[in-house]
Image (tube, rainbow, N blue to C red):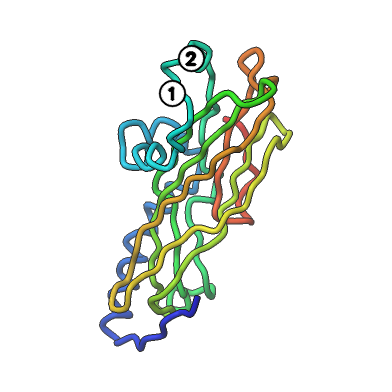
Amino acid sequence: MSVLRCASSPAATAARLLVLAALAPLLAACGGGMFDSSSSGSGGGLSGFMQAVTPASAPAAADDPDQQKLECPAVIIAPGGAALRIGGGSSESVRSQITITDVARECTRGPGGSVLVKVGAEGRVLVGPAGSAGALGATMRIEVRSGDKTLSSRAVRVGATVPSGQAQGSWAHVESGISVPASAFAGGGDTDVFVTLNPAAAQPRRR
């Protein structure tokens, strides 16, 4: 997909710098520690989006007593993984910035006693002072971990296309069919789902 190149006026560049500066404290707070938003999707837009992409043939949890007792791991944004700047080290050289603003998860029983985890995430992309409108995004990693052991790991591309003349856009992604052994939940377990945009983010650890 080609990226639309457009000239940036001094006023537009200044506006983008103000947006990035205003978001910096919020992004630092998101990426500075464990952010458990496993309940943030309940009743919200992301939860509704996840339900919308669920195949119609999927069994309803209310029809199966075992589903109601199924424990689902928490979703945690890895430290430093809530936001990613693309470009140089200075604010003026940033081409784009992508953030995670909300996460959610659902669990169902899979074949052979496994647990199928569906993870949803949504966020925003910003055009930086050195960037331009077009297709902007980054790689998001989803890991299911039990203690120090990685049970599943996926890398997916997330992002949005920002129209010409605009400075930001929103994105949403749902990753389905993440299979986890049922034994990971035995005895309460210490299994969690970690998401991150930054490959150099701190190694995720259970709270």
The percent coordinates of residue 114 (x first, y second) are 66, 25
Instruction: Tell me: 16 left or right of 116.
Output: left
Viewer-closest of 147 and 57: 57
User: Residue at image x 51%, y 13%?
Assistant: 69
Give how far across and how far down residue 124 sits, in percent.
38, 58
**Number of residues whose C-alpha sits closer than 10 Å to that of mark 1, classed few (under 14), some (14–19) or many (20 or more):** few
Q: Is residue 24 left or right of residue 178?
A: left
Residue farthest front in this picture = 57
- Residue 206: percent from left, percent from top: 61, 31
**CB of mark 1 within 8 Å of CB of mark 2?**
yes
Q: Secondary structure at mark 2?
A: loop
Name the residue beneath numbered marker 2.
64
Q: CA distance from mark 1 to mark 2?
A: 7 Å
Q: Amino acid at mark 1?
A: Ala
Residue in the image at 29% along x and 86% along y: 10
Q: In what quadrant of the picture does the C terminus appear? A: top right
Q: Observer-nearest residue: 93 or 189?
A: 189
The 10 Å Cα crowd at callout 2, few under 14, some 14 to 19, many 20 or more, is few
Using the image as rendered, state which of residue 192 and residue 72 is in the foreground: 72
Please tell me whether residue 174 is drawn above or below residue 109 in the rendered image.
below
Callout 2 amino acid: Asp
Residue drawn at 66 percent across, 30 percent down: 180
Asked if 63 appears above or below 26 in the picture, the reply is above
In the depicted structure, whether residue 30 falls above or below residue 47: below
Q: Give how far across and how far down residue 61 sits, in percent.
A: 45, 20
Query: Does dot 1 land on a helix, a strand or a loop?
Result: loop
Which residue bears the numbered disc 1? 60
Residue drawn 46% across and 50% down? 173
